Image (cartoon, grey):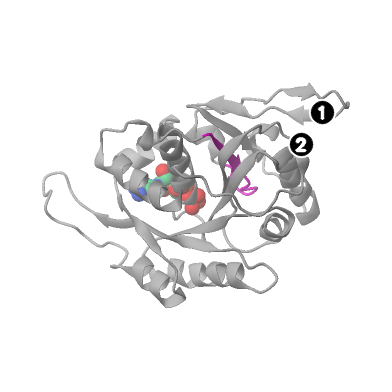
Amino acid sequence: ITARVTKPMDTNQLKDIRNIILVSSGKGGVGKSTVASNLAVSLAADGAKVGLIDADIYGPSVPTMFDLVGAKPSARETEEGRTLILPIEKYGIKLLSLGFFADPDQPVPWRGPMASNAVKQLFNDADWGELDYLIVDLPPGTGDIHITITQGFPITGAVIVTTPQQVALADTRKGLAMFKMPGINIPVLGVIENMAYFTPEELPDNKYYLFGKDGGKALASSFDVPFLGEIPIVQGISEAGDKGEPIALNTSNIISAAFAQIAGKVA
Ligand code: ADP
């Protein structure tokens, strides 16, 4: 991996982070967190130093996807008397999730500014150290958190996750347009089509396009951004996520290879 050095970092805490990459989607449930987790795992497997911020206030997934439900990060004092949150390290990835700070069974009744401040702290008040990539799993849609993150931090680029379905694509179009707005202007690194097709085990040569075909590809070309690749619907992906062991950890399957290929294009 040749790490790309982008704009100079303005916050001291982030000065040793080479790339901040947002993972975004128009709708919830399209597999944004699954993609963010597996990209983080693939980049780390390739030797990069990787961190992952789960900024999805509505449904933080990192605790589940990394088998860390109930885990609480500890903190340390700096010589200047500041308290820094220590990200939890798992599978070689430094992790922070809003879910680590909330009761997993309680809804979080945060108003916009409170949630935005909490997210800012995950960036500014954490001991990230040196990272090649800090991946940020955004909430779905376009809201306060998006404004906070895109305006507040030197973002390298955004990756867009969608399914090929029309309802997902319509929302993804809005999300893509947000990154291209003059005040935001974040490079879109490309579109990933998740749940692209299904292949039954007993019919390995058949692809069923349950949500339509090539919708993500068409979206990428209509916005003139790269198409990064497609991930099929595979039971193993959701099972691995629920077990807290992202599928890309097992490097011997074709899904890992697909994530590795996408990670290579993002890197
Ligand atoms: P989002 O972050 O967009 O809300 P998630 O990553 O939480 O979506 O995924 C929603 C659900 O779909 C999860 O249960 C996840 O395990 C499952 N899932 C995501 N992508 C796939 C896939 N390609 N194949 C099978 N299940 C998937």
Front residue of 266/69: it is 266
Front residue of 216/165: it is 216
Among the two numbered marks 1 and 2 on one chain, the one whose residue lies closer to the N terminus: 1
Q: Residues within 10 Å of mark 2 (few under 14, many from 20)?
A: some
Q: Is residue 209 left or right of residue 116?
A: left
Q: Position of residue 183 (x, y in %)?
A: 70, 71
Does the magenta portion include 56? yes
Residue 26 can be seen in this image:
no
Residue flagged by tag 2: what amino acid is it? Asp
Q: Which residues are magenta?
A: 49-60
Where does label 2 land, which residue?
A: 125
Residue at the (85%, 23%) spot, across then down: 79
Does the magenta portion include 142? no
Callout 2: SS: loop
Residue 39 can be seen in this image:
yes
Q: Residues within 10 Å of mark 1 (few under 14, many from 20)?
A: some
Q: Position of residue 246 (x, y in %)?
A: 41, 35
- Measured in 3D between alpha carbons, the distance from the residue under mark 1 to the one under mark 2, in whole angstroms, is 7 Å
Residue flagged by tag 1: what amino acid is it? Thr
> Is residue 140 positioned above or below 132 on the image?
below
Front residue of 87/102: it is 87
Quarter of image, res 140: bottom right
> Is residue 245 positioned above or below 98 on the image?
above
Q: Are marks 1 and 2 in contact (CB under 8 Å)?
A: yes
